[in-house]
Amino acid sequence: MTRYLRHCGYTIGVLNPLITNRLRETQLRQTKTDKIDARVTTQALMLNLHQTFSENTYDELKKASRMRIAWIHERSKLKVDIVNFLDTLFPEYAEYFKNAIHSKLSYHILLKYTSAQEIASARIDGLSNRFITSHKNRNPFDLKALAKSSIGSHSDILVFQLKATIERIIFINTQIKKLEAYIAAQLQLIDSPILTIPGISNILAATILGEIGDISKFSTPSKIIAFAGLNPRKYQSGQYDSGSLPLSKRGSRSLRYALFQAAQMIWRFDPTFNNYYQRKKNAGKHHFVVIGHITHKLVNVIFHLLTTNSSFVKGY
């Protein structure tokens, strides 16, 4: 719709829903109707509380990085489903593979032999062919013996669900790789100086750049911090001052997560940030408290790099 309206020559404005909600709350009656929504939206536009919408490479990165996050979340849920299916079909399987239950070898076996009964009755040479790589303390003989003594029960519908879920995960993995290749290509076109920061990968860079968008929208680093919801809440009235409160978390969740992850990386690779981290830790600060401080400092660095188009210098 936005592309169509822009094609027709209209200027598109974007409103923060928190702002329109606050304007609606100024009404004496707690009423929500389409007519009131239209009036509130008009008021917000007249007060110039909107931002002009524009599509650029940053918007593409934003959509791509958010799509990747959504696929990863979907994949995580599917992996939980696999464990649940195996609890009925072959309860001992998860303990046998331990942390490798979602490995290529494990999926390779389950697509051919889905339940304990199928593995127990499988030819050993056919099962051996599934062990195409060397795995310490794992071999087809032990797996077959474990299947024979398993308390699992066969279910045709669970077998179908398990295979379908594994195939779905394999498909998502393929799509994620394609999406990551697309993100890398887009970043190469932008050639952003943010990639010169130690520890920031293509994925983190794409998320940060996509969520921030045009850096000219932010006049100071503190506005980026507020946009990410990394600013502490503040409540003061008269003589009362709440002091330190939790983070507001009223902003871009994706940006907040990406900045936090980038802060987790940079102190390991840059001597200046590493010295700061060690100094605060030695002073008794908790790890995540220090990472929070580093996140704020990192935002200052990112703002400087993007506004000056300069590269990161080690020991910044």
Image (cartoon, helix red, strand yellow):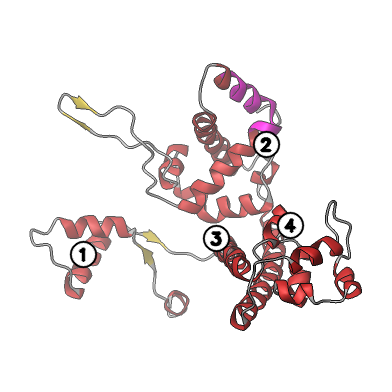
Alpha carbon of mark 2 to alpha carbon of mark 4: how far? 47 Å
Quarter of the figure with residue 265: top right
Q: Which residue lies furthest to the right in this view?
A: 125
**Residue for badge 1:** 40
First of labels 2, 3 by sequence position: 3
Quarter of the figure with residue 282: top right
Q: Which of 137 and 57 lies nearest the eye of the viewer?
A: 137
Q: Is residue 82 left or right of residue 50?
A: right
Where in the figure is residue 200, as x and y percent of width and height? 66, 44
Which amino acid type is shown beneath numbered disc 3? Lys
Which quadrant of the rendered structure holds the N terminus?
A: bottom left
Alpha carbon of mark 4 to alpha carbon of mark 1: how far? 60 Å
Give the number of the mark in front: 3 or 1: 3
**Residue for badge 3:** 62
Q: Which of 272 and 167 lies nearest the eye of the viewer?
A: 167
Which amino acid type is shown beneath numbered disc 1? Val
**Residue for badge 4:** 96
First of labels 4, 1 by sequence position: 1
Give the number of the mark in front: 2 or 4: 4
Which amino acid type is shown beneath numbered disc 4? Tyr
First of labels 3, 4 by sequence position: 3
Which quadrant of the rendered structure holds the C terminus?
A: top right
- How would you rate the neighbour count of disc 2 (Cα within 10 Å): few for under 14, some for 14-19, many for 20 or more? some
Q: Is residue 3 left or right of residue 116?
A: left
Give the number of the mark in front: 3 or 4: 4
Regarding mark 2 in the picture, which secondary structure is present there? loop
**Magenta stretch bounds:** 267-279
Q: Which of 233 and 167 lies nearest the eye of the viewer?
A: 167
Is residue 275 within the magenta segment?
A: yes
Magenta span: predominant SS is helix
**Residue for badge 2:** 312
